[in-house]
Amino acid sequence: MFGRRSFLEALASTPVLSALLPATALAATKRDIIRELGVRTFINAAGTYTALTASIMPPEVMQAMQTAWPQYVSLVELQTKVGERLAQLLKCESAMVTSGAAGALTVGTAGCVTGKDPKAILQLPDTTGLKSQVIMQKSHRFGYDHAVTATGVKIVEIETEAELEAAAGPSTAMMLFFNDAEPRGRIDNAGWVRLGKKLGIPTFVDAAADTPPVENLWKYTGMGYDLVAFSGGKGIRGPQSAGLLLGRKDLIEAARLNTSPNGTTISRGMKVNKEEMVGMLAAVDRFVKLDHAAERREWDRRADVIRKAAVKLKSVESDVVVPPIANNVPHLRIKWDPAVIKLTPQEAMKKLREGSPSIEACPMTNREWLVFGVWMMQKGDAEVVAKRTVELLKSAMV
Ligand SMILES: *Cc1c(COP(=O)(O)O)cnc(C)c1O
């Protein structure tokens, strides 16, 4: 015999019957594996960090994925049609959904190396006889360039225009620019594109974390970059395992040949299925239509709630900083006199994590400042963070 719960579960698992159940009964039977496993959940006062699962997909993204779920399609046909719609929405020649921005770096680089040559595609990561070098400014080297060298290419570092022109040659596959590093390099975005065109080498910019502003989604292709990478699951709030590769049609076609569903390719392990493809399209569609000014006002409000509560305490100071390129959104910073409040910002971060509800502060927290990213918080979170932060600082007062 069924108990009430297992009876509801059996009904809920039968699509025709589950339609007859009231929503409340269905909610009661929903399996919560995160709870079952006892995995810690927390308020995200950090930002779009992969290790913290980064962002929460809006309902219209989940709905698009769920609608796609029980339908078989040709993955290649879906990839083509999703790419065409993305290219329209983002005002570029061509587009594809990748396995994150890191996946976009790998498949985009592979496309630059092999073009559409089946023998070259099969040969990677062995680049013998192929274009085997990617040029970068020394100050632009970053952790994610591992996704580029994973194809087998070697990175050649340059600093000046003259060094770039000397390094460029028949074995140069591509010139990579790290957007967030622009202020640190001698050659800026416009110069990079100009030199690429002059030398006949494809240019690629990693702008993974650089939305908002939304206009960045067409700014870099508009400037003349041949390829642009964005994360799907950061500010755009698409599937966390998705990304965007935008740019030149022939290069995107070549990139697609280097990845799933094609079996014998360097990026076969960077598979993207239909749910991520349609989810990414739904997320971009939502993001380009979003009231970004209203979003910003809400982030400012959250920062204000926490700031106002904190500065009532003795010696506490607080401000809001907006990083200029990546994560270009308000971050709240709080500091205090350690002689008045006996706690370092890093200790505060740890205590917030270990408290209830658990709160993850921003990893930008340092010796001086406790930092909160407010943009990925959910309704009511700012008020809880304000209350818990005040309690914590008060408890450490001498
Ligand atoms: C986050 C990030 C990536 C990786 O993005 P995923 O979408 O997680 O693959 C790559 N490059 C930069 C600059 C990033 O900030």
Image (cartoon, rainbow, N blue to C red):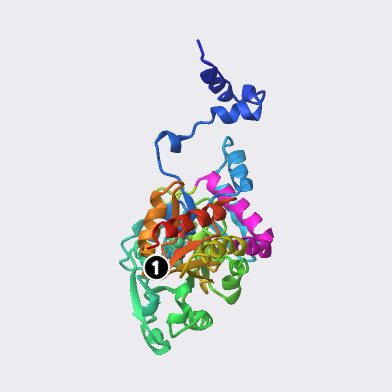
Q: Nearer the viewer, residue 56 or 151?
A: 56
Instruction: Write the start and end of the magenta stretch as one range.
Output: 273-299
In the picture as drawn, the residue positioned furthest to the bottom comes out as: 162
Residue in the image at 34% along x and 65% along y:
149
Residue 13 shows in this picture: yes
- Give x and y (percent) for residue 135: 39, 76
Front residue of 341/19: it is 341
Q: Is residue 298 magenta?
A: yes
* Residue displayed at 34% across by 76% down: 156
Above-or-below relation of 159 to 34: below
Q: Quadrant of residue 34?
A: top left
Name the residue at 48% across, 34% down.
32
Residue named by callout 1: 340
Number of numbered callouts drawn: 1
Where does residue 181 sit, x and y in percent of width and height? 44, 76
Give coordinates of residue 127: x percent, y percent.
32, 65
- Ligand 1 neighbours mark 1 (CB distance < 8 Å): no
- Which quadrant would the C terminus be assigned to in this image? bottom left
Binning the other alpha carbons within 10 Å of mark 1 as few (below 14), some (14 to 19) or many (20 upward) gives some
Residue at (56% x, 21% y) in the render = 8
* Residue nearest the viewer, comparing 311 with 371: 311
Q: Taking the image as four quarters, which one is ligand 1 found in?
A: bottom left
Helix, strand or loop at mark 1: loop
Q: Quadrant for residue 166, please give it.
A: bottom left
Type of amino acid at the residue the image marks with label 1: Val
